Each structure stands twice: as C-alpha cells, then as structure tokens.
Amino acid sequence: MVPASYTLTVPTGGPLDQADVEAIRAMATAKQWTNEEAQAALTEMSDELTAQSTRFRTQLDADPEIGGTQLEQAQVHATRALDRFLPSTTEEGAAFRMAMAKSGYGNYAPFVKLLARIGKAMSEDAPVIGGPPGGARRSAADVLFGDAVAPGT
C-alpha cells in the first residue's frame, strides 16, 4: 500500500544525506512504492556507494605511483591543486568535495593521480645551489640560446 507520506531512515554510517532521502521519496511517490520498497531502495543506494568507496580505496592503496607510502604526499599534492582551482572556502569547492567524499571518487586512483600530478607540477621550483663548475659564469644569451648566439654579440 502506498503511504500518505514516507518514513525513511538513512542507514547508519553510510554516505547518504537528507537530499538522497528526498530523491528516493520523490521516486517512491512517482512509482507508488510502499514504504518498505522506498526504504529498500535507500538502503541499496547506501550499500552500493559504500562498496564503491571501499573498492576505490583498496585500488588507491595498491597503486604503485600514489598508493602505500606515497599516499600522504600524493594527497598533499592533490589538495594543492584543488585549493588552487576550486578552494573549499567557495560554495563550488565545498560542494565538489562533498560529492567526491559521498561517491567515493575522492579515493578513485586515476582521479587522485591526476590531481596529485597537477599539484606536484604546481610546486615551486627548487633553487639551484652553487654555479657552473670552476666558478665560470655564463651570459644570459648563452644560457637562453646556447651556441645559437655568435661570440661577441
């Protein structure tokens, strides 16, 4: 029997929030589900997102470039890229981070790898210590153009 209103409970510890409850409630109303069917759909949605997040994290941890002992540094680089282009202090940045956490894509290895590479590329260049061997200094033209500049020009 279709209820006059649905009483739905978000599964404990899952990634869903009130917006998800409202989406299931609207779907249940449109499809004339019982309260039990609507609750089952909400629980299934939560279980699937949790399983996806766990699967992504396992793959991330095993990634040879950014997983394991490199994960902390990869996260620092990824956060640098996000903070530069979509700061958490903006509405879009906060919404993006919430969506990534909710869906599990915040642990999706290809996505983390992309952001980590961008963040690493954004890192400041390290200063050059010392100079050329023998203390000889090269002119700016030699540094920039090498042999393309004729001597004395």
Image: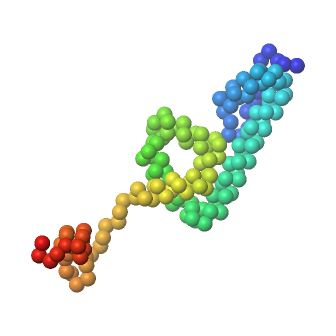
* Residue plotted at (19% across, 73% down): 149
Q: Quadrant of the C terminus?
A: bottom left
- 152 and 20: which is toward the camera: 152
Percent across and percent down for residue 41 are 79, 33
Q: In the picture, residue 145 is in which quadrant?
A: bottom left
Name the residue nearer the viewer: 74 or 33: 33
Q: Which residue reaches farthest right?
A: 1
Q: Is residue 45 above or below residue 35?
A: below
Task: Identify the image quadrant of residue 100.
Answer: top right
Q: Residue 130: x percent and y percent? A: 27, 75
Q: Is residue 54 visible?
A: yes
Residue located at (75% from left, 43% from top):
48
Q: Is residue 77 visible?
A: no
x 25%, y 79%: residue: 132
Q: Residue furthest top?
A: 4
Q: Residue furthest bottom?
A: 134
Picture coordinates of residue 79, whole percent (x, y): 49, 51
Residue 69 lies in quadrant: bottom right
Which residue is drawn at the image coordinates 67% and 58% (left, top)? Answer: 59
- Residue 80 lies, in percent from the top left, at 45, 51
On the rendered structure, is 40 left or right of 18?
right
Location of the N terminus by quadrant is top right
Q: Residue furthest left?
A: 152
